[in-house]
Image (cartoon, helix red, strand yellow):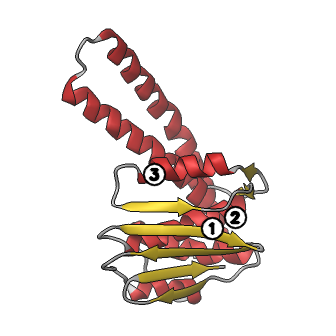
Amino acid sequence: MAQNDATLAALIGSRICHDLISPIGAINNGLELLGMTMKDSGPELDLISESVRNASARIRFFRLAFGGGGDQQLGRGEIAGVLDDFTHGGRVSISYHPTGAYSRTEMRMIFLAILSIESALAYGGEISVDETNNSWTLIGRGEKLNVDQTHWNLLASPASEITIPPSHVQFAMLPIVASEAGRRTIVAIDETTVRISF
């Protein structure tokens, strides 16, 4: 994936997320109104509400991961809120430790790295995110990992001619985004841990 392709992909990602978040918000508002007018919402309405919440959380996460970068600063509260909603009810938890504000470009790298690590934690686990002296480290831990080495090799050799399925596009995007930010992705994997740093 060439740099121009990555830029175009980010624009497409931003556009899709931007256009979807409003109707999903409207559905959620409608559900809240239904809940206020109905005496017993029932499991059906609860299921729809949970599905809308999950969809909204994933779109907010994907907008940061696959949308455009930039210097706009995101505070800890906003970042942690997106991560908490993204993992709500899932098998993977995320511990986000930095307390400062960071640019959308940096968060784009973090969110792509989280998606990469999440793919290895198919059976559940925890991801920790730390930043020290402008260096980031993300560590995923799980009792059992599911690592496709072909995809992980892309992080170290982004020029490799490998066909990536849509579910793993983050492996193609992360090294490009990191390179644009003047960083290099470093990967370490053992039996129960995957680590990405840049």
Q: What mark, if any, has residue 4 been given in the picture?
A: none
Q: CA distance from mark 2 to mark 1?
A: 5 Å
For the residues bearing labels 2 and 1, Cβ distance under 8 angstroms = yes
Residue 123 appearing in the image: yes
Please tell me whether mark 3 or mark 1 is closer to you in this view.
3
Under mark 1, the amino acid is Met
Q: CA distance from mark 3 to mark 1?
A: 16 Å
Residue pictured at 68% horizontal, 70% vertical: 131
Q: What mark, if any, has residue 109 been given in the picture?
A: 1
Residue pictured at 42% horizontal, 28% vertical: 28
Q: Is residue 30 left or right of residue 129?
A: left
Under mark 3, the amino acid is Phe
Under mark 2, the amino acid is Glu
Whether residue 92 is situated above or below residue 193 in the rendered picture: above
Whether residue 154 is situated above or below residue 2 in the rendered picture: below
Q: Nearer the viewer, residue 106 or 151?
A: 106
- Which residue does the numbered mark 3 point to in the structure image? 86
Residue pictured at 33% horizontal, 40% vertical: 51
Residue 173: which quarter of the image? bottom right
Residue 155: which quarter of the image? bottom right
Find residue 16 and report its horizontal and vertical position in percent: 53, 47
**Label 1 SS:** helix
Whether residue 46 is situated above or below residue 155 in the rendered picture: above
Q: Earlier in the sequence, mark 3 or mark 1?
A: 3
Find residue 27 and report its horizontal and vertical position in percent: 41, 27
- Which residue does the numbered mark 2 point to in the structure image? 106
Residue 126: which quarter of the image? bottom left
The N terminus lies in quadrant: bottom right
Q: Is residue 121 left or right of residue 105?
A: left
**Label 3 SS:** helix
**Label 2 SS:** helix
Find residue 119 and report its horizontal and vertical position in percent: 39, 71
